[in-house]
Every structure is written in C-alpha cells, then in structure tokens.
Image (spheres, rainbow, N blue to C red):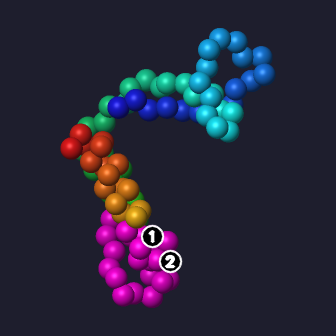
Amino acid sequence: MKLYREVKASANSTGCYLHNDLGYMITPLELIEMTEEEIDFIYSLLPEWTKETKSGMGETFYGTLSHERDLKVINKVKAILSKLKGK
C-alpha cells in the first residue's frame, strides 16, 4: 500500500507535481509495512465506541451523538483494518 503526504507547494517550485483541490502538492512516501501485531496494537488504542455500538441508548452515550453515525465510523474503521491486514 502506498501512503501519501501533502505539503504546501511553494511559488518557486519547478518540475512536475500533482496538486489536490486545495493547492497542496502530493508527493509519494516510502512504502510503510506493518506487522499484524503492530496493526492490532494501533487498533487497541482506538476508543471503544469506534469498535462496537448498541442501539437504544441516549445520544450522549454515542461517540458521534448518534447510533447511525457511530455505525458509519465503525464500518470505516473495519474497512481500513481489513485493508491493512490484506483481507
């Protein structure tokens, strides 16, 4: 998986650069490899509400103040985790 960083393009830049919609220059980074143990460790640092949720609770018990929005975050976290693990 290639990761990218964004840096503000200077007015004096020369050469061929890719820019995003906000005018930031996009440059490729070195490939970052992580072991499954490292991925699991990073996942363990996430708050519990990003991993599972229950319906029917008061809105203040949800990380995003909504069961539906929490589910969207949870599904996104699961998708990223499966990409990292190559599944």
Q: Is residue 25 above or below residue 42?
A: above
Place of residue 86 in the rendered image (x, y in percent of width and height, measured from the top left): 24, 40
The quarter of the picture where the N terminus appears is top left
Mark 1 element type: helix
Q: CA–CA distance between discs 1 and 2?
A: 8 Å
Place of residue 37 in the rendered image (x, y in percent of width and height, measured from the top left): 24, 44
Mark 2 element type: loop
Q: Residue at x 34, y 74 (%)?
A: 53
Q: Which of 18/38 is in front? A: 18
Residue 34 placement: quadrant: top left
Place of residue 65 in the rendered image (x, y in percent of width and height, measured from the top left): 50, 77
Q: Label 2 near label 1: C-beta < 8 Å?
A: yes
Q: Is residue 82 above or below residue 6?
A: below
Q: Is residue 54 visible?
A: yes
Place of residue 28 in the rendered image (x, y in percent of width and height, measured from the top left): 49, 24
Q: Residues within 10 Å of mark 2 (few under 14, many from 20)?
A: few
Residue under label 2, please give it.
Answer: 65
The quarter of the picture where the C terminus appears is top left
Q: Residue at x 55, y 25 (%)?
A: 27
Residue under label 1, please give it.
Answer: 69
Q: Residue at x 36, y 87 (%)?
A: 56
Residue 69 placement: quadrant: bottom left
Q: Residue at x 67, y 39 (%)?
A: 22
Identify residue type, mark 1. Answer: Arg
Residue furthest to the front: 21
Q: Is residue 64 magenta?
A: yes
Instruction: Please provide the residue range marked out in magenta.
Output: 48-71
Identify residue type, mark 2. Answer: Leu
